[in-house]
Image (cartoon, rainbow, N blue to C red):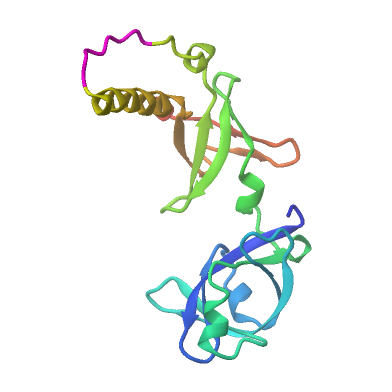
Amino acid sequence: MSEWIEIGTIVAAQGLYGEVRIYPNSDFPERFIEPGKRWLLYPNQTEPEPIEFLGGRYIPGKGLYAVELEGIENRSDAEALRGCKLFVEKSDRPYLEPDEFYIQDLIGLAVFNQLTGETIGKVIDIIPAGNDLLEVELNQKPAEIAEAEPVQQTVPKSTEFERKKARRKMERKVDRKSKPPTVLIPFVTEIAPIVDLENGRIEIAPPQGLLE
């Protein structure tokens, strides 16, 4: 799927005559309003197939678009598309202004601390806010990722239910510790002055306390 850009998901039927509701994953409204070819990926499929947009409109207050699709003429046909992902070809990217980036290009970039020269982690998500936030999965130190020593715990004689309950508590505790920590970094020039897509890195100048 590296040659495609996901732009949204069909979440429901709209009305009785075949329109669908799309939750957008794109900052370009024309993706859902202008007629033309898009690509549809059904759940559990690996290859998208072409579909023709006949036109669409924004639904105020919902954050969704209602779109008319060629060949989809009733509510049943529209409901059958629930959960399908929509794509455009990667070559169909609109022009970006300087300091604008596609989310897809930022995911996975290594994040470097300019103040220390260290790699602190990698970008795993972009969270929309007043200023977008980079969600960065922090590198863990060897001591943090070392497998925990088995806990020697004495379980008094009890019912089988109580012994199983004690084991479940221990398992849940280990699972929580195994998740890598993350930090949210405002994606603004003052804090993330360098985005080097060619070399797969973002350099940050974190203010005091940001990474604590």
Residue for point 61% across, 62% down = 43
Task: List x then y, in percent, for residue 60.
Answer: 41, 78
Residue 21 in the magenta stretch? The answer is no
Report the side of 193 relative to 161 (left or right). Answer: right
Give the image quarter of residue 77.
Answer: bottom right
Task: List x then y, in percent, for residue 155.
Answer: 26, 13
Q: Which residues are magenta?
A: 151-158
Task: List x then y, in percent, for residue 13.
Answer: 49, 80
- The residue lying toward the viewer, choosing from 184 and 167, is 167
- Is the residue 24 above or below the residue 79 in the image? above
Question: Number of labelled discs?
Answer: 0
Q: Is residue 94 visible?
A: no
Q: Is residue 174 visible?
A: yes
Residue for point 67% across, 86% down = 70
Residue for point 47% across, 83% down = 14
Task: List x then y, in percent, for residue 157.
Answer: 21, 14
> Main SS of the magenta segment?
loop
Report the side of 172 relative to 125 (left or right). Answer: left
Residue 157 in the magenta stretch? The answer is yes
Residue for point 75% across, 40% down = 198
Report the side of 151 relative to 76 (left or right). Answer: left
Report the side of 159 relative to 191 (left or right). Answer: left
Location of the C terminus by quadrant is top left
Give the image quarter of residue 123.
Answer: top right
